[in-house]
Image (tube, rainbow, N blue to C red):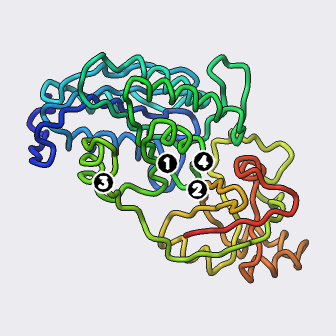
Amino acid sequence: MSLMTNVRSNPVLDGKSMDLVICIDRSESMGYGHGQSKLTLAKDLASEIIRNLSAQDTVAIVAFDNVARISLPLTPTSQLQNLEAIMSSISERGNTCLSSGLKTSLEAFKSTARLKRAIILSDGRTNLSFDGSGGFEGSTSLELELREDSLNLEQIGVRAITVAIGTDAFTLPLKVISDATKGRLIPTSVEKIQELVTALHSDTLSLPLSVKTPKLEKNEMDVASFPSELPAGQPTWSLESIYEHVAIVSEEIASVYSNVGEALIINSSNQRFAKTALMSIETEILKTYRERLPKTTRRVRAGEAILLDKSYRLELELEEDSVVDIKV
């Protein structure tokens, strides 16, 4: 089935033809989520973006885990067929090597005078270097590799929009990519697809992109150790777990989060930030924690403290007595 009948004519895009590479994270950490997996969210977003492109645009799809492959070479949207089958072939597997996705995206572009744009759809939890020599979630050394790859994209004129997929996305690796390519980071859900597509067609990506306004903010919350009652607090915890990463907060904050669905934690001393899912300190599974550590529990209940696992401490570069801000 051709996608041609689904391409919508947009007068705003007239005369702005574009080569677009959509790079999708298919690693194991994309396989979980609330209701829908992060990978499903990424593929649905990619499909909707493609359906809103101009008939003069070309699009390519790259999928990556520990390696990357071109699922669709650059193809005019008017000639694109079997988009559903292409997306269905992308399933979660393997570790996360964002570098492989960027290098393969570079290969997917052709030498043309058209606008060159990339969209990176990932939870940012890169844990493997391109040469396979190592890495782990929250490893800042991997950000240096991503910057070099991103500069290579920027040298051929590519500007990238990175979208943090899922409630527990690490945004800093994605920000490294968008900054190096003079692009944009979207840390929250994309609310208006057409607005995003219009921004892609602009010369500088300078058009405003709608993001959610925080409903609640707390500043200078003390960081306390994560409960051993949860997997992330146990000695055998793997930073590359297939389970969602959460932070433990007061019932008030968790209640707001349950309605909003997204939260950012920020280390204001270095401006590093990440998305996180939130869990109430009053959750039944934490009953023994509340009994063991009543003083810390009182501070969490008062909104004065937050419980974070090791991966967040590494990603945000938190010291022994660090504090964080939270936006829900």
Tags 2 and 1 in contact by the CB under 8 Å rule?
Answer: yes
Label 2 vs label 3, nearer the camera: 3
Image quarter where the N terminus lies is: top left
Residue 164, numbered circle: 1
- Separation of residues labelled 4 and 2 (CA atoms): 6 Å
Q: Quadrant of residue 116?
A: top left
Residue 189 at what x, y percent from top left? 42, 56
The residue that disc 4 covers is: 170
Residue 86 position (above or below residue 161): above
Specify which label sits upstream in the sequence, 4 or 3.
Answer: 4
- Separation of residues labelled 4 and 1 (CA atoms): 7 Å
Q: Residues within 10 Å of mark 3 (few under 14, many from 20)?
A: some
Specify which label sits upstream in the sequence, 4 or 1.
Answer: 1
Answer with left or right where residue 38 lies relative to residue 84.
Answer: right
Residue 33, numbered circle: none
Specify which label sits upstream in the sequence, 2 or 3.
Answer: 3
Image quarter where the C terminus lies is: bottom right
Q: Residues within 10 Å of mark 4 (few under 14, many from 20)?
A: many
Name the element at disc 2: strand
Tags 4 and 1 in contact by the CB under 8 Å rule?
Answer: yes
Answer with left or right where residue 43 lies relative to residue 259.
Answer: left
Specify which label sits upstream in the sequence, 2 or 1.
Answer: 1
Q: Nearer the viewer, residue 149 or 3?
A: 149
